[in-house]
Amino acid sequence: MKGLAILGSTGSVGTQTLDVVRQYPGAFRVVGLAARSSLVTLGAQAREFHPELISCDGTQIEKAALFSNGSRESDLDEMVRHPDVDLVVTATVGDVALDPTIAAIEAGKNVALANKESIVIAGRLLTSLAKKYNVDLLPLDSEPNAIWQCLRGEDRAISRLIVTASGGAFRNLPPAELANVTPEQALEHPTWKMGPKITVDSATLMNKAFEVIEAHYLFGVPWEQIEVVIHPQSMIHSMVEFVDGSVKAQMSPPDMRLPIQYALFYPDRMSNDAVARFDPVATGSLTFEELVPERYPCFSLALDVAKRGGTWPAALCGADDIAVEAFLDGRISFVEIPTVIGEALEGHQSVADPSSAESLAAAAWGRARVAVLAGS
């Protein structure tokens, strides 16, 4: 049985990870579950999977109920280092997973990454540590996971990575109307069911910029060899073009359980009747459109900042975190998200080759700057 520690077990990716675990009784042992405040959901998970370790926020009375089935409290670093843990799944949002990810790598644990912020904030550091400790970083996001699948068995003679994007909730909305969109409208993603932060980032395409950053670090591909196209059907999750002109694509209906399962069982593939299969006739036409930068200013802004290196990506990540929060709270409009992020980053003093502490400090700086500008 493969031992799992799932950070962010009550969120969208965390719950779908446990869906996969349910499909294969006897294949996995859930050693640790970590969540922040969704204690009712966490309690139900604890009663079902009987983890040895639990990490969460809450009062002592609230926590006592979680530990009534023999579990004990643990911090994240202890959880990921536990000797029975073989794979750490980072399914949290934000930078909370960075230090536990580093701790897991240093303990020789493979890491399944759904927390793209960790790679954005400290991609160079994490990939170098993974190489040093001979650890696999397994991408769970559908697009990097698709690239990973396409590269399997190849000699990495890559000409181009083609990352697909649905275009988000407002792909067909006239630009003049974007200033009036509501948070409720932004949270209606056309093809995926995700948490609020990632759904808004998908509408601005900040999420897609983060995936480009992921691909750059995880696969060692130069920025200029990564392209993004709009693919409204979300059936092709990414493509890889090789130097001979051949292109491989990973295709499947939009269901996060498939990339999660691929990472959990890697290097094996397993049958799962609960995951929908691709039907080319029922699907019909697959279309592609050029990404129009003027419609998605966050995308160009994010990549311009990320290419500077140092702590710039970390500051970007923190700034976006609070900008999205401000939009969801009604303090700024949708079109003001890139504006406040850009203004906040103007004063950043980058640190070259940063440590994890310096990267986290830069992310905190970005959050604080946007909080002032957004009036929180």
Image: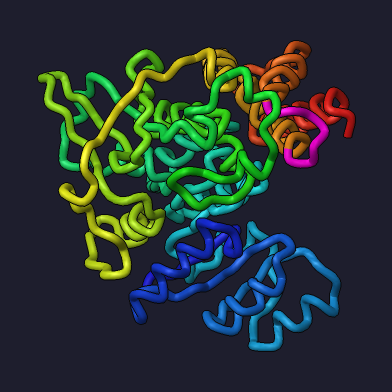
Q: Examine the rendered structure and indicate whether residue 344 appears above or below residue 121.
A: above
Q: Nearer the viewer, residue 34 or 254?
A: 254
- Tell me if residue 124 can be seen: no
Relative to 266, say whether 220 is above or below.
above
Horizontally, residue 159 falls left or right of residue 350, namely: left
x, y (%) of residue 230? Answer: 38, 27
| Viewer-nearest residue: 87 or 181 | 181
Q: Position of residue 21 (x, y in %)?
A: 41, 71
The verdict on residue 327 being magenta is no
User: Residue 352 in the image: x percent, y percent?
Assistant: 62, 17
Asked whether 227 or 295 is in front, the reply is 295
Task: Please give left or right for residue 59 compared with residue 121 in the image.
Answer: right
Q: Would you place residue 261 above or below residue 121 in this image?
A: below
| Quadrant where the image shows the N terminus | bottom left
Q: How many marks?
A: 0
- Residue drawn at (68%, 66%), measured in percent from left and top? 55
* Residue occupying the point 43% across, 46% down: 191
Residue 251 location, x and y as percent? 25, 44
Task: Specify the farthest residue to the bottom.
Answer: 69
Where, quadrant-wise, is the C terminus in this rendering?
Answer: top right
Residue 8 is at least partly visible in this image: yes
Image position of 345 with respect to 58: above or below: above
Residue 296: quarter of image: top right
Which of the 4 image quarters holds residue 122? Answer: top right
Q: Residue at x 36, y 80 (%)?
A: 25
Report whether 102 appears left or right of 224: right
Which secondary structure is most common in the magenta stretch? Answer: loop
Q: Residue at x 24, y 47 (%)?
A: 283
Magenta-colored span: 328-334
